[in-house]
Amino acid sequence: MGSTEDLDYPQIIVQYSSGFLISKVMFTACELGVFDLLLESGEPLSSDAIAACLGTSTTGMERLLDACVGLKLLAVEMTQEGALYRNAEISNIYLTKSSPKSQYHIMMYYSSTVYLCWQHLTDAVREGRRQYERAFGISSKDPFGAMYRSEEEMLKFMAGQNSVWSICGRDVLVAFDLSPFTQIYDLGGDFFNDSIPEAELYILSKILHDWDDEKCKQLLTKVYKACKPGGGVLLVESLLNEDKSGPLETQLYSMNMLVQTEGKERTAAEYSKLLEAAGFGVIQVKRTRKLYDAVLGRK
């Protein structure tokens, strides 16, 4: 007879193979405004009422709602009038637009951009390069690689990043004592071509993972030259284990970097090596056990 592990194996395969179906159910419910409507209503609603309010078919909406119940994003109550649906608390907090911790914008970016790019993951692995242009039938003349089809997509991405920051930003900012730094610059924009102002501390949040090692060294060297003596740079990234055995979320982020950008997720040692190559020393690493970790290098 097979081991317990062998008996569990088919179920794991089923779960993994349906992962993208689960994502799209959640994305669709967000996009149609299901969670927003149920929050605003203040009371449970029937599938017919939800479909009427959101302008969808009753058949499609009922199936979507039931799938969300299965995912524990919604709860259902059976009454004499039929099934009534309401948000689970996790949906009120993270999937409604009005919540301070809303992840709506990142959901929409994943649905409209990341989801389509990942259809070309096989090509990305074969070729070892990003598939953004192939996914959307566009060409890029930007030497550093255009990452957005339009200003609207860029704004959607930025709003999504801000939403993620709302649930993990504090963990990163308290990872080290940053009180000695009085002049802080959050690096963004066209940093390869634009000048970088002098400051005591530079924050590079989820920037280096977009680029290959050479471009990272180029950017960090530029930051080092602008940095005041005694200053430093704070890298906010999702760190791989040193043997790259996990965390799974970071491994998946790295696959996404392969599909969408020129970069990858790295280990703490790899980021330290990049910082040292640019001139930074006294490097500290803090794993937050959340989405993003922190690496601090001093000049």
Image (cartoon, grey):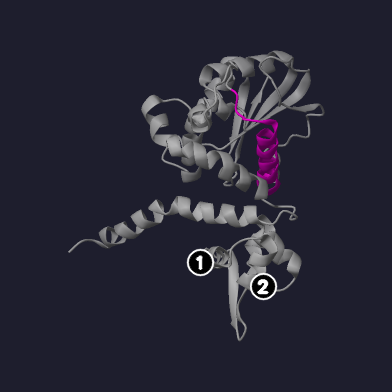
Residue at the limit of the structure toward the bottom, as seen here = 80
Q: Earlier in the sequence, mark 1 or mark 2?
A: 2
Question: At 36% across and 28% down in the image, what residue appears?
Answer: 126
Q: Is residue 12 above or below residue 240?
A: below
Q: Is residue 18 above or below residue 177?
A: below
Quadrant hosting residue 209: top right
Which stretch appears magenta?
146-169
Which residue is the site of mark 1? 70
Residue 243 lies, in percent from the top left, at 41, 35
Q: Is residue 279 in view from this perspective?
A: no
In the picture, the disc for residue 289 is none
- Which residue is located at x 53 percent, y 28 percent? 261
155 inside magenta stretch: yes
Residue closest to the far right: 182
Give yes or no for residue 136 being in the magenta stretch: no
> Circle 2 is placed at which residue position?
45
The secondary structure making up most of the magenta span is helix
Residue type at mark 2? Leu
Residue ID at (53%, 36%): 239
- SS under mark 1: helix
Image quarter in which the N terminus is found: bottom left
> Which residue is at a point 57% across and 17% down the rendered structure image?
215
Residue at mark 1 to residue at mark 2: CA–CA distance: 17 Å
Q: Amino acid at mark 1?
A: Gly
Front position in the image: 12 or 113: 113
In this orientation, which residue lies closer to the viewer: 180 or 119? 119
Residue 217 in the image: x percent, y percent? 57, 17
Position of residue 295 in the picture relative to residue 11 (left or right): right
Check disc 2 and report its element: helix, strand or loop. Answer: loop
Residue 264 lies, in percent from the top left, at 50, 30
